[in-house]
Amino acid sequence: MEYLLETDNITKVYGSITAVDHVSIKLKQGEIYGLIGRNAAGKTTLLKMLAGLAHPTEGSFRIFGESEKKTAHMRDRIGVLIESPGLLLNLSAFENMKVKALMLGMNDDSFLNELLCEVGLEGVGKLPVKRFSMGMKQRLGIALSLVGHPDLLLLDEPINGLDPQGIVEIRDLILRLNSERNITILISSHILEELSKIATRYGIIHNGQLIDEFTHQELLQRCSERIEIRPSDATAAVTIIEKMGFKDYKVLDNSLIQIFERLDESGEIVLELAKNNIKTLGISVKNEALEDYYLSITGGARQR
Amino acid sequence: MINLIKMNLYRMSRAVSTWVMAIVIAVFGFMQFGSLKMFLDDPFNLFDGSGSSSLGFKTLDGVQSVSTFLQNSNILLILAIFVVLFVNAEHKAGFDKNIIGITKNRWKQTLARWISAVIGMTCLILIGYAIMLGLCALFIDNFAFGAVAPMLKSLGLMYLGAVAFSAIFFFFTTLFNSSVGGVVASLIISLGILNLIEMLLDMLVKKFISNPKVLPTDIFYDSVYFSFNHESAGAKAIMIFVLISVAYIVLTVGGSMILQQRRDVK
């Protein structure tokens, strides 16, 4: 099994609105995949389909190497926290978890107590969940998703509404679950800055479409300082740049060249291009913040 | 399925609403006893000289106690509220998001929820009925339990009817994904509003069709239930009552299962 989760052109249409539009993503075992998008971009709908809460209109997905239709007996291997944590407010944290455990045929109460310790809720006793803070509810939501020993966690905006301290706690918890239990995690957020601290790979979803995918390294590279040149002939310019000894560069849209090394040599590049009759239509040294980078991708895209 | 039922019963046992409804039905049992005591023993001589009580009987036996307790719109309202609150609790809290995706066949969860609701409802009926019957046996002079078999027959039939009603309330709660659907349906039935609509429909049918074979009042379950004479019904009448009750259960629970299977969780 190469991929733990694969979606193939998965689509969800509500009336005249296409909430998720032919999205194909692949997750390897042990990855933390960050799904980034604005509100109403289609993140939650995509996660709901993967969690079995919504039926895809089109497309399919494979989990644990099996088609979705054959995974009935494997669905307890997926832990889910979609939107705000769904909790029975008059029950205690333990009782909420016990409800799910009974459904899965688990009678080991000590495991539930261990999970409560894991998420830092060991001292809540019989306190009803309605008296919990937002952060405690989020942590209980994650604990609930862990009942059943899942191999895959689907977390939808788990840091929403949390204070800075709560965000750090949830981030540490997610990283710990990934490293210690080898749980593959698909986590969505509209805050790229936050996801950049935990995810190993990213997908940007906008108006229901997956418009970009990149690794953590690529993200750092894209947001790092670079020379951006727009030559009159990109193909010929690349040959010149290579002759000059540049190796760390990228060509975007067959017109824009990004160079990530020897940033003080932009003048020499223009001169060398001119010598070879290649006009430089534009040149700059850029350094984008993560959020600026995210906005540069989504900002120019089609609006619904 | 067993695990699903266990889960639902655990949730039910931990819900405040369950215990509130248990108290309500206990009070209802007590109140039914009070009204029987007043009409049968007539301690204040309210009905003296009339020759019979306003209930239509002067002595109370097991069969009549079933009518008093179960063939009563108030108890249906109590049971409806219990069923609606229990069934809708998961959805209202959003807890269903944690569990619905786990089983591929979601209809199993719906069926398990209904079976659990019936188990809870049965416990409530037993609590209320036992309180009423016990108090009647202790404090009503004209109470004679009588033969057990006819009482069990009546109890069984009316219990089946109550289960069919619970299925109807269950369906409306599932259909509207809200307590409001089930509560409105139960209020319409218990307040007699549906009965008025049925009579109106009967009149309309009779206006256009002379000697119709079937009238709306023959089809709506409240008419079937409240007009069923379990004491003297023959085999054919019992068969029809059972068939209609089972048909309502199959249609409404089956409909709820299909809805749950096809619908996305919001």
Image: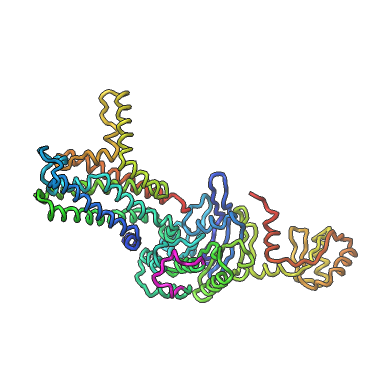
Q: Nearer the viewer, residue A210 or A175?
A: A175
Majority secondary structure of the magenta segment? loop
- Left or right for A120, reference A95: right
Q: Nearer the viewer, residue A75 or B228?
A: B228
Q: Residue furthest right?
A: A275
Residue A229 spot, x, y in % from top left: 81, 63
Residue A277 visible somewhere in the drawing: yes
Residue B73 spot, x, y in % from top left: 27, 44
What residue do we see at 21% from left, 40% from top?
B228
What residue do we see at 41% from left, 50% from top?
B178
Q: Nearer the viewer, residue B256 or B54?
A: B54
Above or below, comparing residue B185 to residue A298 in the picture:
above
Above or below, comparing residue A177 to residue A282 in the picture:
below
- Left or right for B127, reference B194: left
Q: What's drawn in magenta, residue-wise?
A: A121-134
Residue A222 appears in which quarter of the rendering? Answer: bottom right
